[in-house]
Image (spheres, rainbow, N blue to C red):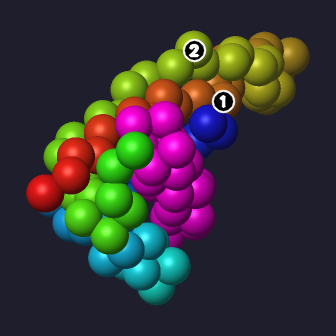
Amino acid sequence: EKGSPKKFNDVCRLIRGLTVADAIHQCALSPKRYAKVVMKVVASAAANAENNHDLDKDKLVIVQAFVGKGTYIKRSLPHGRGRSGVMTRPRTHIRIEVEER
């Protein structure tokens, strides 16, 4: 996903250990910009668990929420006196594991 791993981790810290329904509510009410993306990943993990592994959606709990650094896209940024710097566009890998309890 597009965005910094630190900012995604702020949202993931909120939802670790919660049920899927509570995590979706927490993300929906969060003022963070990345909460909507994390909410989609949680919903996708719940749907995968329900459809592929025949687990009950109401009993799913988020066991782990990993945030990893993806490949940074580098762009040039003009500076004064004809010089240029490097601007990075960060990418993030999000992995959410759910378990039935």
Q: Secondary structure at mark 1?
A: strand
Where residue 74 appears, as percent x and y from the top left, is 70, 16
Characterize the magenta stretch by its predominant secondary structure: helix
Where residue 58 appears, as percent x and y from the top left, is 32, 70
Q: Is residue 54 above or below residue 74?
A: below
Q: Gap between marks 1 and 2, in whole Å?
A: 9 Å
Decide if residue 87 is in sight here: yes
Residue 86 image-quadrant placement: top right
Mark 1 or mark 2, whichever is nearer to me: 2
Where residue 82 appears, as percent x and y from the top left, is 86, 16
46 relative to 44 in the view: left or right: left
Where residue 77 appears, as percent x and y from the top left, is 77, 26
Return the mark for residue 89: 1
Q: Which residue is mark 2?
A: 71
The C terminus appears in which quarter of the rendering? bottom left
Asked whether 33 falls inside the magenta stretch, the response is: yes
Residue 34 image-quadrant placement: bottom right
> What residue is drawn where x is 44% and y is 71%?
24
Residue in front for this viewpoint, 18 or 50: 50
Mark 1: which amino acid? Answer: Arg
> What residue is drawn where x is 37% and y is 74%?
21
79 relative to 10 in the view: left or right: right
Closer to the N terminus: mark 1 or mark 2? 2
